[in-house]
Image (cartoon, rainbow, N blue to C red):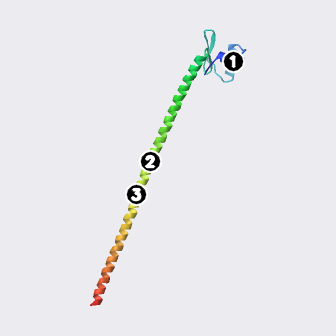
Amino acid sequence: MRVSLKWLADLVDITLPVEELCDRLDMTGTKVEAVHTLGSALVFGGLFGFINSSQQLIGEAFGFAVERFGESNQQLTEALARIEAALAQSLTRSDEQLAYYVAQAREVIDLSISAQQGIVEDLRRLHGKALASAEGGAR
C-alpha cells in the first residue's frame, strides 16, 4: 500500500528523519523496502510506501479496488458454478429416485394383477365344479 507522506504528516506529527521513520515502521511489522525521491517529495517503496500525490494514491486505490472486484467476481462465478453442479447432481438423483419408485409401483401392480387373475381362475373352477355338481345331482 502507498500513502502520501504529506497525507501521513497531516494525520501524525512526523518529526523523525526519514531513515528513523523507516526503521520504526519496520519495527511495527510495516515493511519499507525502498525510498525514492520524486521531485522534492520522498517516496518509499515496498509493502508500505509513500507517494508524491493524492491523485496517484486515488489511482492506485482505484486499481486496487478493480483488482479486488475482479477477484470477488471470480470467486462468485466459481461459487455459482459449484451450486449449479450441485443442483444438476440433485436433479439427476431425483430422476433416479423417481425411476426407482416407478419400477417399484409397476412391480406392485404386476403382483396385484397376477393375484387377481389367480383369484378369478379359482372362482371359475369353483363355478365349473358347482355347475357340474348341480347337473349331476339333477339327474
Q: Are marks 1 and 2 in contact (CB under 8 Å)?
A: no
Q: Find disc 1 in the rendering and name its residue.
A: 10
Q: Secondary structure at mark 3?
A: helix
The quadrant of the picture occupied by the C terminus is bottom left
Quadrant location of residue 28?
top right
Residue 79 seen from this side:
yes
For residue 18, side relative to residue 79 (left or right): right
The structure residue drawn at horizontal position 36% and vertical position 67%, both measured from the top left corner, is 113
What residue is shown at x 30% (from left), y 89% (from top)?
Answer: 137
- Per the model, the C-alpha gap separating discs 3 and 1 is 76 Å
- Residue type at mark 2 is Leu
- Label 2 to label 3: alpha-carbon separation: 16 Å
Name the quadrant of the N terminus: top right
Q: Is residue 84 above or below residue 109?
A: above
> Does 130 sit left or right of 53 as displayed?
left
Q: Earlier in the sequence, mark 1 or mark 2?
A: 1
| Residue carrying label 2 | 91
Residue that badge 3 annotates: 102
